[in-house]
Each structure stands twice: as structure tokens, then as C-alpha cells.
Amino acid sequence: MSGTTEAHGLTNPEGGFPPPAEFTAQANVGEEAYERAAADRVGFWEDAARRLDWTQEWDQALDWSNPPFAKWFAGGKLNVAVNCVDRHVDAGHGEQVAYHWVGEPGDTRTITYAQLKDEVCRAANALTELGVQSGDRVAIYLPMIPEAVVSMLACARIGAVHMVVFGGFSPDALASRITDAGAKVVITADGGYRRGAPSALKPNVDEALTKTEGVRSVLVVKRTEQEVEWTEGRDLWWHDVVGGQSTEHQADSFDAEHPLYIMYTSGTTAKPKGILHTSGGYLTQVSYTHWATFDIKPDTDVFWTAADVGWVTGHSYIVYGPLANRTTSVMYEGTPDTPHQGRWWEIVQEYGVTVLYTAPTTIRTFMKWGEDVPAGFDLSSLRLLGSVGEPINPEAWLWYHKIIGGGRCPVMDTWWQTETGAHMVTPLPGVTTLKPGSAQRPFPGIAASVVDEEGKPIEAGATGYLVLTEPWPAMLRTIWGDDDRYKDTYWSRYGAGVYFAGDGAKLDEDGDIWLLGRVDDVMNVSGHRISTTEVESALVSHPTVAEAAVVGATDPTTGQGIVAFVILRGDAEDSGEELVKTLRQHVRKEIGPIASPRQIMVVAELPKTRSGKIMRRLLRDIAENRELGDVSTLTDSSVMDLISSKLPGAKED
Ligand code: WTA
């Protein structure tokens, strides 16, 4: 895994990249954190929790008497929004910028902590006026505008549970999430800017609300000034309802285990899982990891997580972690190539970004565009880089390190999940000798291990499954409304108390962890988790499709690409390109553009085992044009010939 990558003349030194001396000298967290946590894991997290303001101290740091249902800091009380905003204003930092917000068309907004506090209080008063109470669920379906952050914090402030749905999801996906969560209020916008044009959101909400009941009010932020349909008595303009409120709001404290948010993520069945996060433990770990992994210095850093608030990365490292640490962040609305391919680097230069956190798929896209693009900008403010969402291939790591980081910025490859809430396996900038492609060590206070089928720890050099063997503060508490599924999905494979992450991993001689991707039926497309079953059920819901099988095939830019094999119904006609287009459109409508298959092949048969299970491994071989593996367990091995013979006609665009 070490050696030289030829393509960009980048060298991966045999001994790795030692931590730069200036980091070791002044890092927020040093080697001793590992020792402290090893000696007293729970006590280590208690120290981390004390970085926050509590109105009442907890009685018990960890209650694990009923695994897998954990309670952290039980009896303790705090207000998450007050910790993220008010306490910094009270400490005299009201004038510090919380967000440099950059709209895609070039408009900007600078929001200080004092202004953020006013906005959050106004929104909290507005939600209260709309009848939202502690424990109620509020759906948020917004573009990357400051109101997304304000809405989340306003919910947290009054104890309401937010459920953010990524703006790229379809009306159907939005409706099913609203139904599952039982949301009463939806916060949306007329639209947002993407790829140089306004993209409407409100019509999606209108359509979604024809498919679900229980939503009483829709708050609409005016962003793009697009025409919107209006349902009197239900729809309200944000500027009318929030704008006129008082900036005074008395915040209550909530129990550490009070629900903070639900975030839906794909699993191995068609129904997305509502991952539930709670307050005290979550905020403790996101803020501590943000401070440690990125070595955040609140007075001088300009931090940029280039992700959408609609995903967990945005929740933890655009909103909660950075704000709890009084960080100045950049928030950018649009796409990296609008209006030109240097847009990100222009933003780094303009705001003097010091820490940049993004996904490997984006880095590979930048590699494709060429190093001349970033070379046109001054990136010397950068001092640290982060990666998240999928394994980063060493070549992309080295390019990021050299071309973006000028060879001086440590790269933190952070492994974690929607379910874990915060960083779990990652290097630390002042401590770790970096190995490109490896997420390296469990974070201090985190117990991770790589095990075999039986759950026994593997030897160096072997491959197995990543598991977490002790509870952690930011862990999910359950799947919303489905404790059984929570137990079955994560805690049943190796017995109570062992969390199965669903990722394959390898251990090297030094005990460093190399993540290898999902081992279940979840694909990772551009860092987004999409379930094969979810796409399959979208396809079979189309009247022409009898059966469908979906696999994630290796893709040089997006990590994986979605490839679908479909069998048509007897009476349906294979109209070639036309049909493929229709089916792709159908998936976009059912789930959203991110789930649209890269390739759809119409086949006469699907390879199945004798027990009727579709053999995705073989389909993946076909999709990747590999030599076919062992077909002896197939019911009928001629099926593969049949499918392969279809390949020249395979459609792609
Ligand atoms: C993958 C995103 C390797 C992994 C925060 C995990 C990674 C899934 C890494 C979670 C990484 C995330 N190296 N793989 N540094 N980070 N993954 O829930 O497969 O959207 O299970 O959370 O992304 O994706 P999710």
C-alpha cells in the first residue's frame, strides 16, 4: 500500500508523513489523550463534556445496563443551541463571524455570533407561535443557506427534533420521511441555486404534502424569487413569520438524552432508517472531535466543511461541532464548477480558509480538471485538510496533500457514519505519522476492532469487518420508531454490545486500519449512501419492470456507480434508449437524482442461487467488465451467457 504513484509524480514515502513540528508543538490534543482515554475511557469523555455549559451536572456518565440502548450523561441538563451560540456572545465574542456565507450567484452574507443568536431566537419564537413544542418533529428541506442552520438551532433551542432532508431528494422520498418522523411543520424555500440556475424546492413540498398527512404549516424562505403556488392557511413566508419576532427568547434546558435530530440513511432494505441522535453525548463528541482532529484555534482559523447540511457531515461539522467550538466557518451554496472550475479555490483565497474538509469524490473530480486550476489561486492560508465519506485512494490523498495543501498540510482521513455521529477512526494532526489511504487509529476514547466472521480479532495483514466494541457518546440511540430494527441491524451479528459497522477493513503491521468499503448491499456513490434494494424497488414500481437487480460498480470518479439490470414484464416493449431514459427518470422521481442509475441493462434473466438470492457478485463482474467468477452455485449458468450476450447493446449515457 505504500510505494510511488506514477501518474502525478507524487511520492508516497515508505515511512509515511510524520506530523509537522509546528503541529506537534501546539496541537490541541497530543499523544497523552490516547493514554488518558485508555486508562479511563468514560472519564475521558466526561472531561470532553465539561468543555460544554451544563445547567445541571449529570448523575451517571454512561448507563449501559440495557445494551444496545445507551444513556450518556443521564440527569445532566443543557441547551444545545445556547452552547453553540449564546455562550460565545455572553463571553464577549458576539462580533466574531460565525459564517461567511457565499451564494452560488456571487451574493454573500456575513453572520456574526450576535446576529446568529438574534436569528435563532426569532425563529424559536416563530416555531413556538406555530405550536411547535418540545419533542415535536420539524422537517427541514432547504438549500445551503443560513436559514438551514438557523432552523436547526431554533429547533434545538425549544427542544423540537429536526429532520433535515437533503434538497436533492424527490417529493416521494420527502413524503415518506415526513410520515415516518411524524413532522408537523416543514421549513423550505422557493428554491436554491445549483449549477448556475435556480432550482425549485417548494413544488416538491407541495407534491409531497399530497402524499402525507399531519403537516399543519409550511414556512417558506424566499431565496430565488421563483413563482410559488400558495396554500392559504398552511403556507407562510419566513420573512413574515420569523422576521417580525422578538430577538429575546428564554431557553429551557433539556435532558442530555433529549432527542436532537433524526437523519434518514439508507440501509439494506428499501425503507430508509431514521437515525436518532440525542443532545449531550452528541454535542460532546462532535465538538471534541472537531477541535482535536482539525486542531481548531477559534481565534484564527477559518474552517470550511464543503458538504451539504442535508447530510450528517453537515450536521456535525458545519453546524454543531464548529459552533460549539466558536469557529468561523465558510458555507457555500453551490457546485464547485459554477461559474468556473476554480470556484472553491477562489473562496479559499478570498476568506483565507485554513482548514478544508471534503470528500474523495470531489478531490478526484478536481484531479480530472487538472492542477492548473488551483494553481491560479493563493492557497497558502490552508494548514490542514480533511477527507470523509469513502476510502480515499492513495493517489487522491497525495494529490490533495501536494497540490491543494502545498505539501505542508496534514490530511485527516476521518472514518465515521451517520450512525456514529462523529469521527471514530482518524489520525490526529499533532501525533500521527500519516499513511495515505489509511484512516489509521481509533480516536481516543473509541474502541474499534477488525474481526473475522466469528467475531475474533484478525491478525496483521488480514481482512475483516470493522466493529465498535464499546458505546460512544455520539452514537445513535435507536432507529426512530423501530427498536427491533436497531438491534437487528447493528447489534445482532456478534452479540450484544458489539456494533457492526457494515464496512470491510484491513489491519497492517502497525495496527493501522485501512477501510475497504461497504460489505452489505449499500452503495457509496459520490460519498452518498444508497441502498441497492431501494433502487430496485423504485425500478419495479414502474409498470414495465418485472424484476430488477442493482449493483454498485467501481467508478473512477464517484467511487461507485449504480448499474441496474432489469427484466421487463411480458407485455412491455424494449424501446431501447427511450426505455432506459424513462426508467432513469422514474428513479429520479421516486428517490432523487443521486440515485439515478449510471447504466441500465435490459436482460432476460437474472443470475440466482438455488435459494433464489440474486448473485450480485456476478452482476458486478459484468458491470465492471471483469472475467466472471465462479458460477457453479447458479441455478442455470447459461443465464450469464444470456446476460453477457446482451452487453454490446448495453446502454449508457
Ligand atoms: C463510508 C458519512 C472509508 C463508510 C460521514 C461508512 C468511509 C459510510 C470514510 C458512512 C472514510 C465514510 N474511509 N470509508 N474516511 N468515511 N466512509 O452515513 O462506508 O453518509 O460506513 O456518513 O461511508 O456514510 P454516511
Image (cartoon, rainbow, N blue to C red):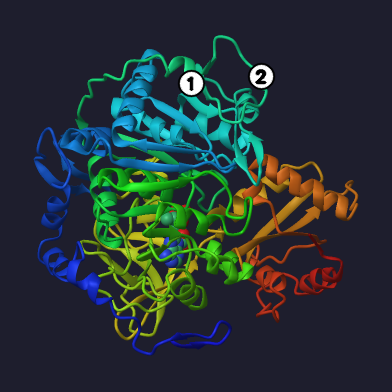
Q: Is mark 2 on a helix, strand or loop?
A: loop
- The local crowd at label 1, few if under 14, some if 14 to 19, many if 20 or more residues have their Cα within 10 Å, is many
Circle 2 packing at 10 Å, graded few (<14), some (14-19), many (20+), is few
Left or right: 161 as drawn, with respect to 33? right
User: Residue 648's spot in the image, x, y percent?
Assistant: 85, 71
Q: Which residue is nearer to you in this view: 253 or 53?
A: 53
Residue 138 shows which numbered tag?
none
Amino acid identity at mark 2: Glu
Left-right relation of 527 to 34: right
Which numbered tag is attached to residue 238?
A: 1
Residue at the (23%, 72%) spot, across then down? 22
- In percent of the image, x 46 and y 26: which residue is there? 183
Q: Nearer the viewer, residue 532 or 203?
A: 203
Q: Is residue 274 visible?
A: no
Question: Does label 1 or label 2 sit earlier along the sequence?
Answer: 2
Residue 229, disc: 2
When asked about the image quadrant of residue 8, the answer is bottom right
- Beta carbon at label 2 within 8 Å of ligand 1: no
Could you tell me which residue is drawn at 49 percent across and 73 percent down? 403
- Location of residue 457 with respect to 493 vertically, above or below: below
**Residue 515 x/y as whole percent:** 43, 71
Kindly identify the residue that appears in the image at 57 percent across and 31 percent down.
175
Q: In which quarter of the image is the N terminus?
A: bottom left
In the image, ligand 1 is in what quadrant?
Answer: bottom left
Asked which secondary structure carries label 1, the reply is helix
Q: What residue type is labelled 1?
A: Trp
Residue 30, position as x, y percentages in the image? 18, 68
Q: Which of 162 and 435 is in front in this view?
A: 435
Q: In which quarter of the image is residue 356?
A: bottom left
The percent coordinates of residue 347 (x first, y second) are 48, 53
